[in-house]
Image: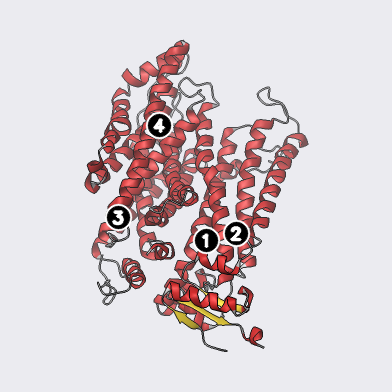
Amino acid sequence: MSQEPGLNAGPNLAPAERLERTVLAAMSRPSLRYLGALGLCGLLVLMLFAIWGVIIWQGMGIAGINHPVSWGVFITNFVFWVGIAHSGTLISAVLYLFRARFRTSFNRAAEAMTLIALSVAGLFPLIHLGRVWIFYYLLPYPSERLIWPNFRSPLVWDVFAVTTYMLVSAAFFYIGLLPDLAILRRRLQGWRSRVYGWLSLGWSGSLDEWRHYNRVYLFLAAFATPLVASVHSIVSWDFAVSIVPGWHTTIFAPYFVAGAILSGSAMVFTLTIPMRRILGLEAYIQVDHFEALAKILLFTSLIVSYSYICETALAWYHGNLFEMEQFRYRSFGDYWFLYWIMILCNSLLPLTLWRKSWRRNLRWLFILSLLVNVGMWLERFVIIVNSLAREYSPYAWGTYQVSLAELGITLGSFGLFFAMFLLFCKLLPVLSMTEIKERL
Amino acid sequence: MEPMQVFHDREEFLARLRELRDAGHGWRDLDIHMPFHVHEVDEIFALPPGGVRFFALGGGVLGFAGGLAFVCYTVLSWPLITGGKPIVSVPPFLLIAYLLTILCGSLCAFGGFLLLARRPGFGEASDVDAHGDCFMVRVREEKKR
């Protein structure tokens, strides 16, 4: 990215000054490459909304979902994007409570990733509804017959869980930004200074502000921490409380949470490795920090692999015919190819991270992160589609083919995610300057 | 108003604070600004923990009680048996109460912070616009008298 004159961090500057200049340089005038990337993502976003418009106009027949596979790519995308959000909270809140020092390198980008991924995830239940104009049926209100939603339904739990997650994450993100916004107020001029000053709520860094700030940050971290475990558990119960073979299992909650952290950690690599290089943040996001995050990725990959083994073993051990057939079908049925790619990406390739040299190889970490995300997307697809394609009665079996409309919307969601992240990089400080100054 | 004493070194700033404390000044007598939170300052002045915890606790309790009361009200206002489950189904209703505990606790803590830290506050003295650059301290005018 191009840097404004005078913003380049020189070797003789004080560490705090160098940090501020580096972060400001990242927010300087966009380069052609940046604009090109944003334009490409913008086209994908346009495609998403255009296809969604056609679906609204012509109906859900355009999508590939039909009986018996009535949950397809849209729900796969919903679960995938909610999962991506999880690692942001893990890095920002959980690692804060454990006082892990490397979190300051990633926490701002990871928190932004959480909010962006949740925004993208939120689109999919709406797209899947078909008749999006009656989205308010999802909300807890008494209908015209004064009947409330059924609070025993996991779909209603989802509304509460995702909304709570979004609001708590937004509050946590904004609180963390306040002192940095005040720095931008000082460093920038004109209308930008006024806007950031307004956004910083007039933050002055007084002792009284810091005293209350520290407490609220701690409380928000403490409130957000159980959400890391509970939100994806609740998403997993969308499946687990049904009696569909392959879904009706008690290990789904920890299995989904581990998978969410695996895919979220991978996405942090996908975003921060290029960001570090393009924005010149090597001094602040160090290879040691990536190595620490790689250990989290390896650990969660092992939990996910254990879950794959466990659910297959459980199906075999309790001898239920439908359950056994489901797991045979997953491995050797119509979608066998996707299943084995999933195993390769989520269970086998992360094993390379046992070696220190691979954990410190940023090229490999970047490639691995892309492959893990492919694997995690496929995991959701495999769970959802296989189980619905082969339930109890052979007369109700069927297969599912992803339509071009679904594929376009999926690509569009990636475009939306990356476009919003690119905008974040230009509009807000990508590093938590205040927290990094503490350890300089 | 007396100008701020400015420090670029953290240790010098802390030494000055210790001097002021030994001279009999409490933290409320001083106008202190820091680019980041320095934990030693809490120890020097033995700072009380502040009131945000009461907002967090109050919000959490309110969210839990309100959430539970809300779902119970909805099922009792028109008791329909669905799926053979009890009208008041405790496990799923606790889930809603749990989520509202977190939501209300977080939002009340956030609101409490804004209230106690008196944010938003615009149009204050311009010398504090230098936030993030240095440590600053001065004795408040009224405390000098």
Checking the image for residue A175, the label placed there is 1
Which amino acid does the dot numbered 3 rest on?
A: Gln
How far across and down, in percent of the image, does residue A239 sit?
50, 29
Decide which of tag 1 and tag 4 comes sooner along the chain. 1
Which residue, given by chain and number where applicable, does mark 2 sit on? B110
Please report, as a chain letter, where disc 1 is located: A
Please report, as a chain letter, where disc 3 is located: A
Along the line of sight, which residue is nearer the eye, A394 or A306? A306
Mark 1 touches mark 2? (CB < 8 Å): yes
Residue B111 in sight from this viewpoint: yes
Label 1, secondary structure: give it.
Answer: helix
Which amino acid does the dot numbered 4 rest on?
A: Ile
Q: Quadrant of the C terminus of chain A?
A: bottom left
Label 4, secondary structure: give it.
Answer: helix
- Mark in the foreground, 3 or 1: 3
Q: CA distance from mark 1 to mark 4?
A: 33 Å
Decide which of tag 3 and tag 1 comes sooner along the chain. 1
What's the residue at 22%, 47% (across, down)? A363
Which amino acid does the dot numbered 1 rest on?
A: Ile
Which residue, given by chain and number where applicable, does mark 3 sit on? A286
Let me know if marks 1 and 4 both belong to one chain.
yes
Q: CA distance from mark 3 to mark 4?
A: 27 Å
How far across and down, in percent of the image, does residue A206 sit?
55, 73
In the figure, residue B120 lies in which quadrant?
bottom right
Along the line of sight, which residue is nearer the eye, A189 or A289? A289
Which residue, given by chain and number where applicable, does mark 4 sit on? A303
Q: Residues within 10 Å of mark 3 (few under 14, many from 20)?
A: some
Q: Residues within 10 Å of mark 4 (few under 14, many from 20)?
A: some
